[in-house]
Amino acid sequence: MITLVSSSLVAGTPALDKAVATWAAPEKLPMYVYTLADLNGDSVLDAVILIRDPVYCGSGGCRMIILKGTTEGFSPVSTSTITREPILLLPEVRHGWRTLSVLVAGGGALPGQVLMRFNGAAYPSNPSLQVRAIPKDMKGAQTLKFN
């Protein structure tokens, strides 16, 4: 079973704000939306953050941050550039973490969903360099909500 929690806030919980502020330092806390989901099967909710601040967005999309949920808050896992919605949570697991799919479009890129597979240390930093998702990959996918 997958646990998902969505938020329409431009700021999250104090623990999320602290983790995002640490990531953005020395810049101020950027505007962001988030979804919580157990990405690594440890029964602790992890955070998928989509930065909405213009400083971190361009014609190809915005930054996505993945944070691992811990008993003390959140710790950084990876940052990806040029990410667009929809962001999908796929059934596939690589190195203990669920595969994500993000939309690549704009900035001259051919639009389409790509696979963001965990490599044992992080998710890819540049979605435009990832393999395109095919219908078989998308079977059972859940759309992460960033309302």
Image (cartoon, rainbow, N blue to C red):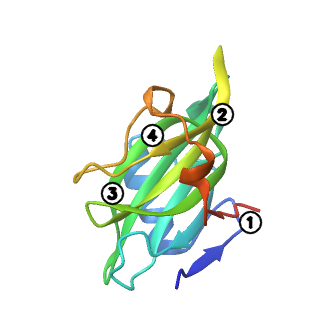
Q: How far is the residue under mark 3 from the one under mark 2?
A: 27 Å
Q: Quadrant of the C terminus?
A: bottom right
The secondary structure type at the circle numbered 4 is: strand
Please tell me which residue lies in front, 73 or 137. Answer: 137
Please state the horizontal and vertical placement of residue 20, each as a whole percent of the image.
46, 56
The residue that mark 2 highlights is: 112
Task: Name the kind of residue labelled 2 in the image.
Answer: Gly
Which sits earlier in the primary sequence, circle 3 or circle 1? 1
The residue that mark 4 highlights is: 80
Please tell me which residue lies in front, 45 or 139. Answer: 139
- Disc 4 residue crowd, few under 14, some 14–19, many 20+, Cα 10 Å: some
Residue 76, numbered circle: 3
Task: Name the kind of residue labelled 4 in the image.
Answer: Ser
Residue 29 visible at all:
no
The secondary structure type at the circle numbered 2 is: strand
- Disc 2 residue crowd, few under 14, some 14–19, many 20+, Cα 10 Å: some
Q: Is residue 68 above or below residue 56?
A: below
Residue 8, numbered circle: 1
